[in-house]
Image (cartoon, coloured by chain):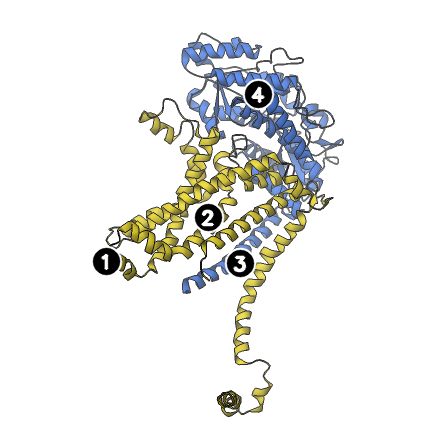
Amino acid sequence: MAEQRFATVPRTAPDAADPTPASRRRRFGLEQRRNLTGWIFLVPAAALILWMNFYPMFQALILSLKTGRGTRLNFADPLWFNYERLFSDEIFKLTVGNTFIYLAIQVPIMLVTALVLANLLNDKNLRFKGLWRTAIFLPAAVSLVSYSLVFRTMFANDGFVNDVLLWLNLVDSPINWLGQTDTARFVIILGLLWRWTGYNMVFYLAALQNIDYSSLEAAKIDGAGSFATFWYVTIPQLKPMILLTAIMSTNGTIQLFDESWNLTQGGPAYTSMTMSHYLFEVSFQRNPNFGYGAALSYVILIMVAVLAAVQMKIGDKRD
Amino acid sequence: MTTWKKIAALAVVVPLSLTACGGDNGSNGSDGGDTGDGKLTVWAWDPAFNIYAINEAAKIYQQDNPDVEVEVIETPWDDLQTKLTTLAQSQEFGELPDIFLMQNNAFQKNVINYPDLFSDFSDSDVDFGEFPEGVVAYSTVDGVNYGLPFDNGTAISALRTDVLEEAGYTVDDFTDITWSEFIEKGEDVLAKTGKPLASGMAGSADLIMMMLQSAGASLFDDEGNPTIVGNEALIKSIETYQQLVESGVFVEVNSWDEFIGTFVNSNVAGVMQGVWIMGSIQSAEDQAGKWGITNLPKLDDVDGATHYSANGGSSWAISSNADKELAADFLASTFAGSTEFYDTILPSSGALANWLPAGESDVYGEPQDFFGGEPVFSQVLEFAAEVPSNNTGVYYYEGRDAVSAAVTKILGGTDVETALQEAQDNVEFAMQ
């Protein structure tokens, strides 16, 4: 009985509201029309992405199956020759190691620092909040090349850092920062921290605004200290943002190029060179081998994709 | 949510506007090359040196051809190489300038990989017999000339006479000596004045490559196969370099500007480089009259070792997109045909000619006040005649980079044989 009554209502309703025969000839219902409008709005962007991102990616995939110098490229035999070649490339292995060292050390330090800074700057009683926020975010507005060059000058043998260390009598002779493997990597990591911590902090600050202050207050009333509040109340609510920044930072670090190129030139002896820098060298500095370069770029893509997938699996606890 | 929408909108619009800009640049660029508009565009990289030279050449050419306009676009060498590779790879030859400058060491690589970038000089009025054979060889592929040699890369050893005097030496004490004598005297100078005698960039094999060439040796054999392992001259060069660094006579720095700074700021009392370094030396006006030049020390116990070598040097190329006749005529009547031109650029920029008739000019014999009143340019021309030829081959940069890395490792404690074997493997791998 009930079923029948409910079924008849929609069937009769359109006829009653709009009895003209023209409406029956409409090819799409209202819902479909709405959808279509949405799709039409999406088309320009989607077409651009297809044309400017996916088409070159597809071309690069084909390129990575070719070998040869310059423009004289032929399909490799076997097709996966360039990928096979990667496994016996000692310099490539070294650059993979370097990149993952940067990733493993820099990203955790940066995200934790950004989180702590964001939390401090979110304090309702803090004075000159705007000033602190701007000061910490400002490095993110500096071009990668210019800050790399400034760091290179600061860490030169007779640069600012050595001058200060000598003046404070912390060292006896200037440290050759960029000339030794460990210190060169250290300088790159330091540069990255300086440049990107403020950037990530802003993401956390934005997310913190969405946290209901009453939840923090409730924790306080329940007797939680500031660390406990931070750890048990703030962090869980920031989880989606932490996931986003972790993926972005991982992605960015794996594709790191400017710092390696401008700060250390990959030296000494390739020990601070990143994968992308090596890719550039293979394609432009040496005898151009674009097939191999494209294969390299695909391996970097796979690494980014795998790491992002792992992070999403770990970080996303929504069901 | 609205912020996200704005960001999304921006993400669509920004690339659009960027492509629009890109398109504009493109059409501007293609005005540059092409034919018959009486305008020549040139890519070169050093305002104090090669850009200065081509602008002077333009002035001289304009005396007879007032309608011709020369526009120079400053393009650092690394960028120039990247641009050429990109244009060649995308077949966008319309974006090429009429004329570009190219490092001699990179010439073979570019002509062999991208012959489409170049126009050859076979129809031009340039008489290549008027250039030293070894220098023309850099830009000659299969007997065809693709480049007009510009500056000379003859190596010099420039020393601060005032510092040497303080330690009781003169430039003559550093002339026609061996490297072991150089290190011995250098240690003495260092002990007495606190100043090392030379500097260079860590991880750049410039000095080692100069030592190698001074003995007529190379990293490749005539067939282009790498000969890094068991290369006597190379091993001796690396050993010498190691002694230089460990004795403190040679200081390693990390970048080019630091390197220039070492002698401009009087932290070191000498330079060993191609003659083009004289331009940078002369930028320190307070040091006028305090410099002298001489030949390089010679490797101990190596067959064919000499006091002469070269580093760098560049040649002009005419692109495939050029107003070929005009470009060829411009180069032929200035860089390969005007003594007046070379007389103008030599004293102010130190651009030593490869064009032999220019060397007969009186300007070369004139004393140079900056260099203690010595006729340094005719001295260098004498060195230039003695430089053993250099086999660069297509894989020069791969070889040099591998050796640079090997030297860094050797200085860090790896034994020479292992490091060189690794370098050879890396070069062979790159050549596959």
Give the mark nearest the N terminus, 3 or 4: 3
Quarter of the picture holding the N terminus of chain B: bottom left
Please tell me which residue is depicted at 43% across the width and 20% down the height of the picture.
Answer: B287
Callout 2: helix, strand or loop? helix
Mark 4 residue type: Asp
Assess whether mark 1 and mark 4 are in contact (beta carbons under 8 angstroms): no
Graded by Cα atoms within 10 Å as few (under 14), some (14 to 19) or many (20 or more), the crowding at tag 3 reads some
Say whether mark 4 and mark 3 are on the same chain. yes
Residue depth check, mark 1 versus mark 3: number of the one nearer the observer: 1
Residue at mark 1 shares a chain with residue at mark 3? no
Task: Provide residue A100's location: percent of width, then percent of height.
Answer: 50, 41
Q: Which of these two is toward me, B416 or B10?
A: B416
Can you see residue A290?
Answer: yes
- In front of the other: B268 or B373: B268
What amino acid is labelled 2 in the image?
Ser
Q: How far is mark 3 from mark 2, CA to CA?
A: 26 Å
Q: Which chain carries label 4?
A: B
Chain colored blue: B
User: The residue under label 3 is which amino acid type?
Assistant: Leu
**Chain for numbered disc 2:** A
Pointer 2: what residue?
A249
Residues packed near mark 2 inside 10 Å, few (<14), some (14 to 19) or many (20 plus): many
Q: Which residue is the site of mark 4?
A: B415
What secondary structure is found at the residue carrying circle 1?
helix
Chain (yellow): A
| Res. B69 visible in picture | no
Kind of element beneath mark 4: loop
The residue labelled by disc 3 is B16
Label 4 neighbour load within 10 Å: few <14, some 14-19, many 20+: few
Is A140 situated left or right of B59 in this image? Answer: left
Q: Alpha-carbon neighbours of circle 1 within 10 Å: few (<14), some, or many (≥20)? A: few
